[in-house]
């Protein structure tokens, strides 16, 4: 049976693709040529902020004094969860040493990148949790230097809670600069910062495009689009909770898709009836985003059974995937394409976004079909090494010489030949391409 769309999106994330590439290229070129002064010019123009760009210890202390103790405790709670989960992830990567053939030893080492640049959005919403997610994982990975960068509010500065969170989680420097100019400052090593080896964290379309353009000269966590969420629900699900969860994710932005996939028509219709009222009840800034996202990007899909639901979900490869259905172990074992999975109504994407410990910097726009989200591993290079005894190199050298000649790479073959000649003088080896 074909999927039945009870609600079909009229737009997709690609429908809103803006022509920002040339703008971002021009800004990056200007800043790379002009350095600190040009970055400050862009900051004055776009951020409308002329305070300290690199926050001093006094700036950080003053900001921390403005953060309520209850919020500080919540930030510490979230940080502790993220830290412990990152430490557990790091423990899954270990150095390896194995004797491939007698006398030929190969290994791997996990080496953290030297400098990380963590972008923390501060525009429409102040993403305190992004400071926690990005800085903490970089710190656990072992990065020597971590810069947290966040856009200041015009004439005010960076949100004090973001400053407190970034500092508490281990940022070495906090940069009060937004958008492309902030990304450029971390990449090019402006204001005395080390050049970032990797850029991580969410941001608007200009930040995302800057990271995409710079990828190659620096590493990035991923190329991100608008956030998206999918809920798999059967007839046992609570319609009010399902509807609330959809609305909670739609408020991210006007172009943030939310999808409901179910095998129960009554549930689908009840959720569709509830959502508009839940949106109307939001504060105005959240309401406008959620209304547009629901109107233009949301979909409600009716399937015949749970296997079809799972296949549908894997096809979407959502950033966030929630299951509110019976037999959660079946879903855990069956589903394969998602950024982060939330099993049962007792958890929700909002938990993962803020305080569970798993990261909320996740693949969007179907990228979960081939990659996961930000983790301690993103900051670590898995490199290999080898060494050998002379006897251990013998069979490898013979095979290398013959394979290289078959490929037409005579120089490679001779690098093996000279070793055989030195280590085993007087011996005859058949090293021709045809054996």
Image (tube, rainbow, N blue to C red):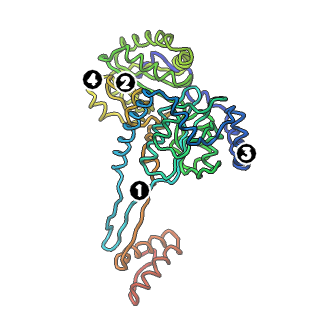
- State the residue in front, 327 or 312: 327
Q: Mark 4 packing: few (<14 Cα in 10 Å), some, or many (20+)? A: some
Inter-mark Cα distance, 4 to 2: 11 Å
Q: Position of residue 10 (x, y in %)?
A: 56, 20
Which residue carries the number 2 mark? Answer: 232
Residue drawn at x 59%, y 29% is: 123
In the displayed orientation, state which residue is furthest to the bottom: 426
Q: Helix, strand, or loop for circle 3?
A: helix
Please identify the quarter of the rendering in which residue 268 is found: top left
**Horizontal side of residue 97 vs 412, given as left or right:** left
Mark 3 in CB contact with mark 1 (< 8 angstroms):
no
Q: Earlier in the sequence, mark 4 or mark 2?
A: 2
- State the residue in front, 292 or 402: 292
Which residue carries the number 3 mark? Answer: 37
Which residue carries the number 4 mark? Answer: 326
Q: Mark 1 packing: few (<14 Cα in 10 Å), some, or many (20+)? A: some
**Horizontal side of residue 107 vs 113, given as left or right:** left
- Callout in the foreground (3, 1): 3
Q: Position of residue 66 (x, y in %)?
A: 52, 29
Q: Mark 2 packing: few (<14 Cα in 10 Å), some, or many (20+)? A: many
Please identify the quadrant where the N terminus is shown.
Answer: top left
């Amino acid at each position: 049976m074909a999927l039945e769309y009870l609600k079909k999106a009229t737009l997709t994330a690609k429908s809103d693709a803006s022509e920002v590439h040339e703008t971002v290229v021009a800004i990056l070129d200007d800043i790379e040529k002009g350095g600190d002064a040009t970055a400050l010019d862009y900051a004055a123009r776009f951020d409308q902020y002329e305070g300290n760009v690199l926050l001093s210890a006094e700036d950080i202390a003053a900001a921390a004094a403005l953060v309520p103790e209850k919020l500080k405790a919540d930030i510490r709670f979230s940080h502790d969860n993220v830290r412990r989960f990152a430490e557990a992830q790091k423990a899954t990567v270990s150095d390896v040493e194995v004797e491939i053939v007698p006398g030929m030893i190969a290994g791997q080492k996990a080496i953290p990148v030297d400098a990380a640049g963590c972008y923390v959005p501060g525009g429409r919403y102040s993403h305190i949790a992004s400071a926690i997610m990005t800085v903490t994982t970089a710190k656990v990975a072992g990065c020597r230097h971590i810069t947290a960068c966040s856009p200041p509010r015009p004439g005010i500065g960076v949100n004090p809670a973001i400053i407190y969170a970034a500092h508490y989680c281990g940022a070495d420097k906090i940069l009060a600069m937004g958008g492309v100019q902030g990304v450029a400052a971390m990449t090019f090593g402006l204001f005395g910062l080390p050049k970032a080896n990797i850029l991580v964290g969410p941001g608007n379309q200009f930040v995302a495009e800057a990271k995409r353009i710079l990828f190659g000269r620096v590493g990035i966590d991923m190329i991100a689009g608008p956030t998206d969420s999918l809920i798999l629900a059967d007839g046992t699900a609570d319609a009010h909770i399902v509807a609330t969860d959809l609305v909670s994710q739609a408020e991210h932005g006007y172009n943030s898709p939310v999808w409901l996939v179910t095998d129960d028509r009554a549930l689908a219709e009840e959720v569709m009836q509830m959502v508009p009222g839940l949106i109307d009840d939001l504060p105005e800034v959240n309401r406008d985003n959620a209304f547009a996202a629901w109107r233009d990007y949301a979909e409600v899909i009716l399937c015949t059974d749970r296997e079809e639901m799972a296949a549908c979900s894997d096809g979407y490869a959502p950033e966030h995937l929630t299951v509110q259905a019976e037999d959660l172990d079946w879903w855990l074992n069956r589903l394969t394409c998602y950024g982060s999975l939330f099993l049962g109504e007792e958890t929700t994407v909002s938990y993962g976004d803020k305080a569970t410990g798993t990261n909320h910097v996740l693949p969007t726009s179907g990228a979960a079909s081939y990659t996961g989200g930000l983790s301690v591993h993103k900051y670590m290079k898995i490199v290999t090494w080898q060494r050998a005894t002379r006897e251990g190199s013998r069979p490898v050298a013979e095979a290398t010489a013959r394979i290289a000649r078959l490929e037409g790479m005579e120089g490679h073959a001779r690098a093996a030949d000279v070793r055989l000649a030195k280590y085993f003088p007087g011996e005859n080896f058949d090293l021709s391409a045809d054996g």
